Image (cartoon, rainbow, N blue to C red):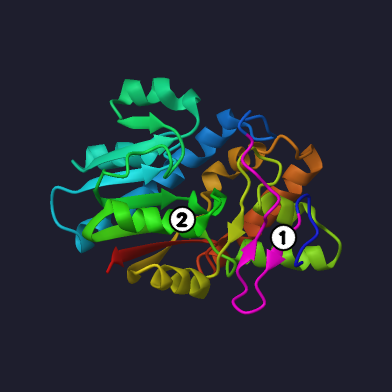
Amino acid sequence: MKYRLKFNVFQCPECDFQYCPDATFNKSFVSDLNETTREKALINLRKENFHRILTSIKQHSQLHQHGLEVGPGYGWFLEVCKDNNIRCEGIEPETRFNERYQKEGLSVDNGFFPQDISSSKKYDFIAYNDVIEHLPELKEIMKANYAMLHENGLLIINVPIQEGLIYFISRLAYRFGIKSLLNRMWQFNFHSPHLSYFNKQTLLKFSKENNFKLEDSFPLKTINLSEISDRIKQDNNQGVLMRIITKVGAVVLFPFLQLFPDTYCFVFRKV
């Protein structure tokens, strides 16, 4: 066992891959997550990152792409694809976004990947935007990715990584008995907690073992200072004092996040 948190976290002694076998997706969708402030805090940041990801997709795949996003949430990635004339559909377990999808003309089915999608479907790319760390049975998911991608298809995974500065500080705080930061990084108070935490080498090794080779990788922005207050307020479990401390810490650390980013995007090709 690596960390004793709300749910226990384990670490592979050989590759340092971290995982939590006890946390599960709460299908009641009830948690400490404030969706209103979360949307306001993330929309500009995520769309900026998604434009960077689409640039890589265009560089590494052919024209007339047809993609699938697993867990589109608010649908921002699908919107950016639509704005760039890229056809992309989604599969999402939460039905509360359906009205939004319909309004924006987005094609999204409700359900879980891969069991709720036809295995006969084929795509030019499959994207996981801050999603794969929330999913169980990763080996089965990688098999499904391989089966549903066309020859030379792309697998896009953007994911929080252990090498990030905020995760490092959270681990350091844990050594001094402060568990709240790691609980927050693993999102254990939210209805869809993290079930795993990769480092770069572990994700590359895992993808290679499942017949994917790396084509591109690049850091993504973690926070925008102009939206940091809303980002902090998305956690209803935080008190006023902790929010102030978190905001001051984020402002101080912001320049260093460019050197040690907490989120990375990896673009793999099916081989």
At label 1, counting other C-alpha atoms closer than 10 Å, the crowd grade (few under 14, some 14-19, many 20 or more) is many
* Residue 37, horizontal then vertical, whole percent: 58, 32
**Going from the N terminus, do you reach mark 2 or mark 1 first?**
1
Q: Which residue is depicted at the point 67% across and 56% down?
A: 20
Q: Is residue 183 visible?
A: yes
Q: Picture quarter containing residue 157? A: bottom left
Say if 171 sits above or below 83 in the image. below
User: Given the image, on which type of amino acid does mark 2 rest?
Assistant: Glu
Say if 35 sits above or below 194 in the image. above
Q: Which residue is depicted at the point 71% across and 34% down?
A: 236
Say if 13 sits above or below 30 in the image. below
**Magenta-drawn segment:** 8-26
Q: Residue 9 lies in magenta, yes or no?
A: yes
Q: Which residue is depicted at the point 42% across and 68% down?
A: 207
* Residue 144, horizontal then vertical, whole percent: 38, 53
> Disc 2 or disc 1, which is closer to the eye?
2
Q: Secondary structure at mark 2?
A: helix
Q: Which residue is mark 2?
A: 140
User: Given the image, on which type of amino acid does mark 1 rest?
Assistant: Val
Q: Which residue is mark 1?
A: 9
- Residue closest to the far right: 177
Q: Picture quarter containing residue 220? A: bottom left
Q: In this image, 154 relative to 241: left or right?
A: left
Check whether the beta carbons of the residues at disc 2 and disc 1 lie within 8 A of each other: no
Residue sitting nearer the eye, 244 or 38: 38
> Separation of disc 2 and disc 1 at Cα?
21 Å
- Residue closest to the far left: 63
Q: Residue 28 lies in magenta, yes or no?
A: no
Q: Secondary structure at mark 1?
A: loop
